[in-house]
């Protein structure tokens, strides 16, 4: 048996293990989308399409939806940011960007604000409009958890499929 012939089964095993690790977590399916929940995040019951608590117990991720008939993403963004500025205590916009979630254009906003007790929080929101429905994917956490939680959220969005 040649050296290459002996390596092929080992390479196949390594590829299978890597693919399994990349897909670790629970597959969540709603009527609107599927996503793979990163290990450590817990699914909670609630009125939202998806409601998760992070591994630290203090972070949360929500997915909700609203009617957006006749509204494009640019208009939604202007109205949404005005609402955030009015409703969030000590609101400070950190970044504003655009991306895609499974081929659908999405706005991405990151901001800091304060809770009523003065606790600082950092929030990232992805908003996409699909089939006249606005979907808001909202991650809220303590600033020191942001990078880790944002990486988990990005992983979940990379596995996102609209139905």
Image (tube, rainbow, N blue to C red):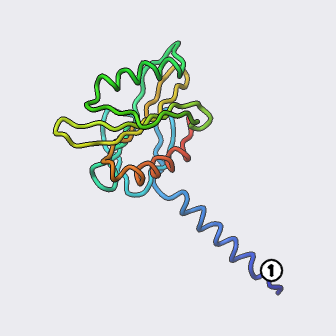
**Quarter of the image where the N terminus is located:** bottom right
> Which of the pair 35/157 is nearer the observer?
157
| Figure check: 134 above or below 61 | above
Q: Is residue 163 left or right of residue 13?
A: left
Q: Quick check: 119 above or below 8?
A: above
Percent across and percent down for residue 9 are 71, 76
Estimate the x, y position of residue 83 in percent, counting from the top left: 35, 21
Whether residue 163 can be seen here: no
The residue closer to the viewer here, 28 or 124, is: 124
Residue 37 lies left or right of residue 86; in this view the side is right
How many residues crowd mark 1 within 10 Å: few (<14), some (14–19), many (20+)?
A: few
Q: Residue furthest bottom?
A: 1
Up-down relation of residue 118 to residue 131 (above or below)? below
Residue located farthest toward the right when viewing the structure as drawn: 2
**Residue under label 1:** 4
Residue occupying the point 54% across, 57% down:
23
Number of numbered callouts drawn:
1
Q: Position of residue 101 (x, y in %)?
A: 56, 37
Q: Position of residue 12 (x, y in %)?
A: 69, 70
Compared to residue 36, the image places residue 3 above or below, namely: below
Quarter of the figure with residue 139:
top left
Q: Residue at x 48, y 18 (%)?
A: 68
Secondary structure of residue under mark 1: helix
């Amino acid at each position: 048996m040649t050296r290459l012939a002996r390596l092929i089964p080992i390479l196949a095993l390594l590829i299978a293990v890597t693919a399994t690790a990349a897909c670790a977590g629970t597959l969540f399916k709603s009527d609107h989308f599927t996503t793979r929940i990163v290990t450590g995040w817990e699914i909670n019951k609630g009125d939202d399409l998806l409601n998760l608590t992070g591994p630290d117990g203090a972070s949360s991720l929500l997915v909700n939806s609203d009617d957006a008939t006749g509204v494009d993403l640019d208009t939604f963004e202007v109205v949404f940011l005005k609402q955030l500025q009015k409703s969030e205590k000590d609101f400070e916009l950190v970044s504003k960007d655009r991306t895609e979630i499974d081929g659908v254009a999405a706005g991405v906003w990151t901001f800091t604000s304060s809770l009523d007790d003065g606790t600082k929080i950092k929030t990232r929101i992805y908003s996409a409009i699909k089939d006249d429905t606005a979907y808001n994917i909202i991650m809220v956490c303590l600033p020191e958890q942001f990078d880790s939680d944002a990486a988990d959220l990005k992983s979940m969005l990379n596995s996102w499929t609209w139905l």
